[in-house]
Image (cartoon, grey):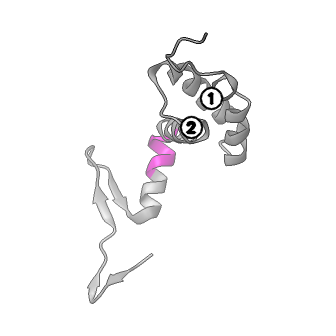
Amino acid sequence: YRTRVGKTAVDATATLFNQQELAGIDGLKRYLLKDRQDQFIRSIVHKLAAYSLGRPLTFSDRADVDKLSVNLRESGDGLEDLILIITRSNLFSAPQSTGLDDE
């Protein structure tokens, strides 16, 4: 990380909408782990599932994402665990409708 940009010192502090003060990346990490861990996990599951499937997730995928998020929390929040959870899920193995009539 940078402490200076040119001759100017970098100010890595911020105040969130809820008046939570953050001091650099360590402050952000503490905030996410303390106050937003479930939300952060769900977001990671959502993004990696969409990437794995090669398509945007839809409203009908929401229950699967919630279930996968719970499974990840129970398994210890590891990236390897997340990959296995997604690839073994119904979301990953279920065929998706194209919206076209199959004849």
Q: Residue 38 in the image: state x and y as whole percent.
A: 51, 35
Q: CA distance from mark 1 to mark 2?
A: 7 Å
On the picture, is 96 further left or further right than 7?
Answer: right
Q: Quick one: 37 or 20, which is closer to the camera?
A: 37
Query: Which residue is tagged 2?
Result: 45
Judged from the image, the secondary structure of the residue bearing numbered disc 2 is helix
Residue at image position (47%, 36%) is 39
**Which stretch did the figure color magenta?**
31-37
Q: Are marks 1 and 2 in contact (CB under 8 Å)?
A: yes
Q: Residue 45 in the image: state x and y as whole percent.
A: 56, 37
Where residue 71 sits, quadrant-wise, is top right
Quarter that holds the C terminus: top right
Q: Across the whole image, how many numbered discs are drawn on residues?
A: 2
Q: Residue 72 in the image: state x and y as whole percent.
A: 65, 35
Q: Compared to 41, does 25 lie above or below? A: below
Magenta residue check for 77: no
Query: Which residue is tagged 1?
Result: 68
Residue at image position (66%, 29%) is 92
Label 2 crowd (10 A; few <14 / some 14-19 / many >=20): many
Residue at image position (61%, 40%) is 52
Where residue 50 sits, quadrant-wise, is top right
